[in-house]
Image (cartoon, rainbow, N blue to C red):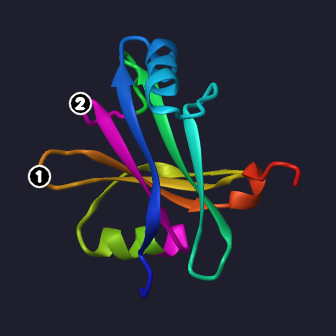
Amino acid sequence: MKNRVTGLGGFFFKTKNPDQIKEWYKNHLGIPTDQYGWTFWWRDEQGNKCSTQWSPFQEDTTYFSPSEKQFMMNFRVENLKELLKVLKEEGVTIVGEVEEYDYGKFGWILDPEEGTKIELWEPVDTAFYEND
């Protein structure tokens, strides 16, 4: 596969109080947070609008499982299902099944060193566009 990872889709981390930490980042770093955290917009090489998400999660979330890490990375990918097939053939641990939403397809893998869960996202950025 030519393009496995096309960009950083997001950075997610656990915190005691997501609302309080979002407010701190908003007040001290000027990050325009909302209920999910912050969606950072940028353009890819073809000029398409793309998003990267920064999101604090409640410290007792199970979304990062089976990893026990305090964070999880999300990478933007092309053709998620094909990529997962190739990764499985390469011996990479796949977690769960692909989930599909109007904003993209998601799959998960574990890195081999510490079992960090990595989210792979085939995005549909247009689902997030604001009415221009």
Q: Badge 2, how many Cα within 10 Å: few under 14, some, many 20+?
A: few
* Residue 49: image location, x then y, percent: 68, 65
Q: Residue at x 26, y 63 (%)?
A: 92
The quadrant where residue 4 appears: bottom left
User: Is residue 115 something that shows in the picture?
Assistant: yes
Q: Residue at x 49, y 51 (%)?
A: 97
Asked whether 76 falls inside the magenta stretch, the response is yes
For marks 1 and 2, give the CA distance.
Answer: 13 Å
Q: Is residue 52 magenta?
A: no
Q: Badge 1, how many Cα within 10 Å: few under 14, some, many 20+?
A: few
Q: Which residue appears at 69% of the width and 59% of the height?
A: 125
Q: Which residue is mark 1?
A: 113
Q: Is residue 61 left or right of residue 71?
A: right
Q: Decide: marks 1, 2 in contact (CB < 8 A)?
A: no
Instruction: Name the residue type under label 2.
Output: Glu
- Residue 55 versus residue 124 in the image, above or below: above
Tag 1, which secondary structure?
loop
Q: Where are the magenta residues, as a range?
A: 64-82
- Where does label 2 land, which residue? 68
